[in-house]
Amino acid sequence: MRMLLPWLVLLAACGGGGPSTPPDNADFDLALSPASLSLVEGASGTLQVSLIKTGGFDREVSLALVKIPTSLGVSASFSANPTLEQSTLSLTASAPPGEYNLLVRGSGVVRGQMVKREKALTLTITPSSALTVVGQVRNLHGRPLAGFQVCRGSDCVSTDPEGRFRLSGVEAPYNLLVRQGPSATVEHHFLRLSRPDPLLLAFSTEGGAAPTFSATLSGNLSGATFPNPSRTVVQTVYASPVATLTQFVSPYDNLAALFPGQGPAYANLKAVWSGAASASGRVHALQWRHVNGAPGTPEAFLAYGSRVVSLSQGASATLNVGLSPIETGSLTVYLGPVPVGLTLVSRQLYANLEPRSLFLFATNTNPSPLGLSWATPRIPGKTLTFAASAIAPDGRSAALQQNGLSPDGVVGALLPIPPALLSPAQGQAGVSLDATLSWSRPANSISILALSGDGKSRYFYTTATTLAPGLLSGKTYNWLVLAYGPFASMDAFAGPDWLEGYPTFGWDVTFLAAGSRIQSFSTP
């Protein structure tokens, strides 16, 4: 060991065991690339921080982001810190949109002294277009669907007991898939939505209808001529926002009719409603005389009355209703040309009593003439609703309902033209797996494309008239298109107007509906 000591002394004298002493002009500075950064609110970005070394500077420099406004929530990290050459600065900013002036600081030893070098960094935060989507899924009947998956790409959440869901960071326009789970055989695809609060109304009975409750009403009517004279009838209806549709055919839910020679007593009016086991509503009674030989065509309205009633499940209640004389109005409805190939099968006129509770008082099943004039009841505060439907032998259909009409005047109405399936052609074989389906639809409507044949039933909700759904090999597919309106966009369709489900005749809703025929095609 004694022989090694001279060599160790020599090495120490040559400085080989420690850092070199920098020249007197050694120094450093910082360079930023880019010198400014623009981020969308809540997003992340990076820039390069490089050392500019002069005079043989070879020391490490510690980096920091400083001069951060208190209003700016920022997360910053350097890929190498301290660094001898360069480092990547990563920033995530959460702050109100605006421009912020920051500093990147480098600290290092120069000529035995700790010095700081700084470079200005301009950070611009722009508003984010990302949405937090909070929506609800309901079925055909308007019943919330609990425990269903709502997916945006691979990001899936489950609906709560009220059918509600929440998705964050959603860029509009967005598509959503609704299904019971990953292995579900029924899928609902809602395409190109932009609103943050969509109501996704699945055209399906999945989840069933809401449970119903019922009670029985009986009583006496007064204030009009009884028993009913010749050609005179009275309809007594239970109406409520929670009542089920009035059945003007068996089982006659929410309706009791008195024909010529009957009255003033009415009995066994079965009131049916959904929701809670008790409900409030109103019993309406309307008396009119019809045209001789035409029970569906009123000639004059004689009396009307109503009375509030509260009911509970299984109850039998007695409710007497007083009627008062009313005047008769006249409404003429001109229906435009019926779509080619369809036959007009029904026209109906209702009195609007309560939300979702209409009172049918006139029907006509003749395909002509297209213009009809009806006697109407002038009930203070009540409007009328006109409905019409047409069908074709090949399954095409068209329907409309026009709400809020005056009992007097002249109005026009036009049935929608049913969708036509354009491509693939009926029975076409060898359709490619990436084929685009195309169809037509009525103006101011959305399309519901229903496709089945590969083990799944898929429904696509869109304002487009073309779609490439993705097909499987060796399959025979069936498809049809339904149209509903009036809607100018998917966002309008996903609004709150149809919270109770897809409308039907007898609701106080203006709507159009049309359906194509069913066609088939096959893939190779």
Image (cartoon, helix red, strand yellow):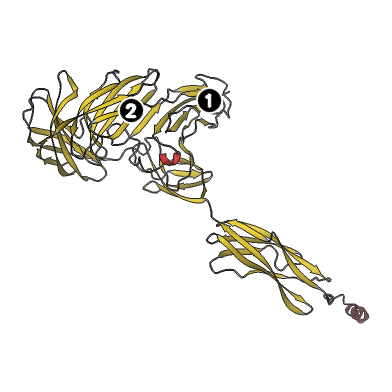
Above or below — where is 275 with respect to 122? Answer: above
Tell me, yes or no, if residue 313 can be seen here.
Answer: no
Instruction: Specify whether 407 is left or right of 337.
Output: left
Query: Is residue 372 placed above or below 470 in the rendered structure?
Result: above
Residue nearer the viewer, 381 or 180? 381
Q: What is the spatial separation of the Cα atoms under label 2 and label 1, in whole angstroms?
A: 42 Å
CB under 8 Å between callouts 2 and 1?
Answer: no
Image x and y of residue 493, in percent: 41, 39
Residue 97, x across and y down, in percent: 54, 59
Residue kind at label 2, given as amino acid type:
Ala
Q: Quadrant of residue 112?
A: bottom right
Q: Position of residue 352 (x, y in %)?
A: 23, 36
Q: Quadrant of residue 124?
A: bottom right
SS at circle 1? loop
10 Å neighbourhood of mark 1: few (<14), some, or many (≥20)? some
> Label 1, on which residue?
475
- Residue at 43% x, 31% y is 443
* SS at badge 2: strand
Q: Residue at x 39, y 32 (%)?
A: 484
Q: Where is mark 2, residue-wise? A: 413
The three-letter code of the residue at mark 1 reads: Lys
Q: Horizontally, is 210 left or right of 269 in the view?
A: right
Q: Quadrant of the N terminus?
A: bottom right
Most distant residue in the front direction: 409
